[in-house]
Image (tube, rainbow, N blue to C red):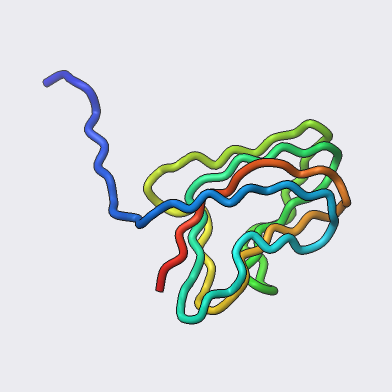
Amino acid sequence: MSGFPVFWQRNVGVLIPVPINTAVSGDIIIQPAVVLASTKLYRLILLFGGATNITFKDGAIALSGPLPFVANGTIVLDFSGDPWYIGSLNTNFIINSSNAVQISGTAWIVVSG
């Protein structure tokens, strides 16, 4: 049998684009806490103007280890049907930057209960 692979789609909800344009160090709140809801990150593109370490966080809890990036580095997390990161109920979804460098891009999230 030949042909193209068939990909199925999940009903993930409405992907909300969140623009990211910052040059601060520390916690960058991508989605503030919503009562009885969690944040799911489905897509992401970030470009870094300088060297920094990025950590994805669910409130105070790290969801990743520190990911090192060099100046003009990029991260792309493409849509796969499954979220890359899932936050817990009632918490901020955060990207933490170790250095005050320009970070630009977009995160596509779903906020649901």
Quarter of the image for residue 65 reads: bottom right
Which residue shows up at 82% across the image and 61% down it? 26
Q: Quadrant of residue 6?
A: top left
Horizontal side of 44 relative to 55 (left or right) equals: left
Q: Position of residue 14 (x, y in %)?
A: 39, 54
Camera-side residue: 62 or 78? Answer: 78
Residue at image point 60% right, 44% down: 106
Q: Quadrant of residue 46?
A: top right
Instruction: Tell me residue 29's x, y (percent).
Output: 68, 63
Q: Is residue 4 above or below residue 50?
A: above
In the figure, 34 relative to 22: above or below? below
Q: In the rendered view, does 8 fall on the left or right side of 110?
A: left
User: Which one is nearer the viewer's eye here, 82 or 90?
Assistant: 90
Q: Residue at x 74, y 54 (%)?
A: 66
As drawn, the residue found furthest toward the left would be: 1
Q: Position of residue 12 (x, y in %)?
A: 35, 55
The residue drawn where x is 58% and y is 51% is: 18
Instruction: Point out the image quarter for the N terminus.
Output: top left
Viewer-side residue, 71 vs 31: 31
Count of labels in the image = 0
The quadrant of the image that shows the C terminus is bottom left
In-image side of 100 versus 96 (left or right): right
Please determine whether, in this image, residue 13 is positioned above or below residue 89: above
Q: Position of residue 5 (x, y in %)?
A: 24, 28
Question: On the rendered structure, is 88 left or right of 20?
Answer: left
Above or below, 91 relative to 54: below
